[in-house]
Image (cartoon, rainbow, N blue to C red):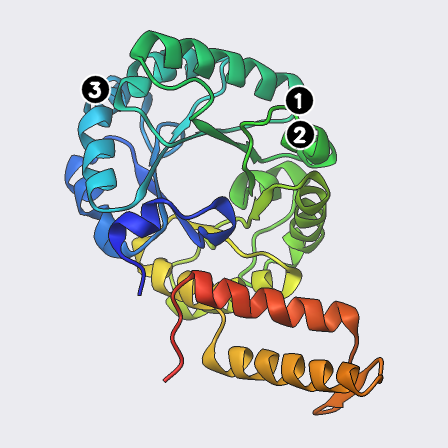
C-alpha cells in the first residue's frame, strides 16, 4: 500500500475524501489524520463561530505541520474575501497550507482576487510562488452556472467542490437522504469540471448514518466523480471505498482489456464481454480504471 509520504504527493485526481473539520477544535484537528482522508480541511467559515476564528487562525501552523507529518494534505477553507477572508489568509498562510478553499464562490472574479491574495501571502511568508492550490466552493445556483468560468479562472485551481446544505437552501429544496433535489446540480458540476480539466469534488452527505453515506458515495461514483467531501470522520472509510476500484471492478476491467486486445490482433473491432459490447471508449475506460487502482496501491490477492 501507499506510504504516508507518498500519499501526500498524490495528484488531485487521486484524492478521494476531503474532510472538513471544526476550525477551533484543536484536539479534533490533531486527531484527524487517523480518519484516513486524503485531504484535511480546517474550516474557518460555518464550522467556526466568529468569536473563535482568531483562536483557530492562531493554531493553523501547528495543525498543518502535524497533518503533513502524518502524510496528509493540509487544506483550509477561508471565508469570502468580501468578509473575513483576507484576515483568514494573513494568519493561516504562515502555516503554508497545501490547498486554500474558499466558500460562497459565485463568480470568476472572486477566484482571480483569491489567487492574487494568496500570491501576496506566499511572497510575505517565503512560500514558493504558485505552489498553493486553490479549490473554489460552489454553493449557489449562480455559482453553478458559472462553474466553468470559476474552474478556469486561475491555473492554481486544481478542483472545484460542491455544496449540500447551502445549495439546497438556495434552490428552496427540502433536504432528503436520497438527495434527488441535488441530482442536476451534482451532474452539472461534474460535467463543468471535466470540461475545464479540473477535479470535481462531490458535496458531503450531511446525515449521520454511514450506510446512507456509502450509498450516496456510490451514486457520486456512478455520476463520474472520483472524490467526495465529508463533514463526519465516520464517513471517510465509506467514501474511500466507493472512490477506490473494487477487486471485482478490476477483474472485469482486465477481462475487457484482454478480450479487446485479443480481438484487435485478429482484426476484429469490438468484442462481447459478458453481454457488453467493448469498443474503443469502453476499452480506454477499463485501462483508466486499472491505472487508478494501481496508483492507489490496490493489490489483488
| Spatial CA span between label 3 and label 2 | 32 Å
* 95 lies left or right of 108: left
The spot of residue 60 in percent (x, y) is: 24, 26
The answer to whether marks 3 and 2 mark residues whose Cβ atoms lie closer than 8 Å is no
| Spatial CA span between label 3 and label 1 | 30 Å
Q: Quadrant of the C terminus?
A: bottom left
Residue 276 can be seen in this image: no
Q: Residue at x 56, y 58 (%)?
A: 176
Given residues 176 and 96, the one toward you in this image is 96
Sort mark 3 into few (<14), some (14-19) or many (20+) by Cα contacts within 10 Å.
some
The answer to whether marks 1 and 2 mark residues whose Cβ atoms lie closer than 8 Å is yes
Q: Quadrant of the N terminus?
A: bottom left
Q: How many marks?
A: 3
Residue at the spot of label 3: 58
Q: Which mark sits nearer the N-terminus, 1 or 2?
A: 1
Mark number for residue 108?
Answer: 1
Q: Which mark sits nearer the N-terminus, 3 or 1?
A: 3
Amino acid at each position: 500500500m501507499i506510504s504516508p509520504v507518498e500519499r501526500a504527493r498524490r495528484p488531485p485526481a487521486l484524492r478521494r475524501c476531503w474532510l472538513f473539520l471544526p476550525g477551533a477544535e484543536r484536539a479534533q484537528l490533531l486527531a484527524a489524520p487517523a480518519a484516513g482522508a486524503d485531504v484535511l480541511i480546517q474550516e474557518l467559515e460555518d464550522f467556526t463561530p466568529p468569536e473563535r476564528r482568531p483562536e483557530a487562525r492562531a493554531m493553523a501552523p501547528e495543525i498543518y505541520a502535524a497533518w503533513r507529518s502524518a502524510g496528509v494534505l493540509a487544506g483550509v477553507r477561508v471565508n469570502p474575501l468580501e468578509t473575513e477572508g483576507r484576515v483568514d489568509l494573513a494568519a493561516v498562510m504562515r502555516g503554508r497550507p497545501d490547498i486554500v478553499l474558499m466558500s460562497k464562490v459565485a463568480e470568476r472574479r472572486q477566484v482571480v482576487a483569491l489567487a492574487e491574495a494568496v500570491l501576496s501571502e506566499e511572497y510575505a511568508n517565503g512560500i514558493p510562488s504558485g505552489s498553493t492550490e486553490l479549490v473554489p466552493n460552489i454553493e449557489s445556483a449562480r455559482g453553478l452556472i458559472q462553474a466553468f468560468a470559476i474552474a478556469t479562472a486561475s491555473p492554481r485551481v486544481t478542483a472545484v467542490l460542491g455544496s449540500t446544505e447551502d445549495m439546497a437552501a438556495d434552490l428552496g429544496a427540502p433536504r432528503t437522504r436520497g438527495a434527488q433535489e441535488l441530482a442536476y446540480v451534482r451532474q452539472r458540476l461534474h460535467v463543468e469540471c471535466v470540461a475545464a480539466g479540473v477535479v470535481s469534488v462531490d458535496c458531503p452527505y450531511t446525515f449521520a448514518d454511514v450506510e446512507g453515506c456509502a450509498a450516496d458515495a456510490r451514486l457520486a461514483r456512478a455520476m463520474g466523480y472520483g472524490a467526495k467531501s465529508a463533514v463526519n470522520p465516520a464517513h471517510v472509510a465509506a467514501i474511500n471505498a466507493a472512490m477506490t476500484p473494487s477487486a471485482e471492478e478490476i477483474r472485469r476491467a482486465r477481462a475487457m482489456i484482454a478480450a479487446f486486445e485479443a480481438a484487435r490482433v485478429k482484426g476484429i473491432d469490438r468484442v462481447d464481454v459478458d453481454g457488453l459490447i467493448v469498443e474503443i471508449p469502453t476499452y480506454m475506460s477499463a485501462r483508466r480504471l486499472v491505472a487508478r487502482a494501481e496508483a492507489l496501491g490496490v493489490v489483488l490477492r
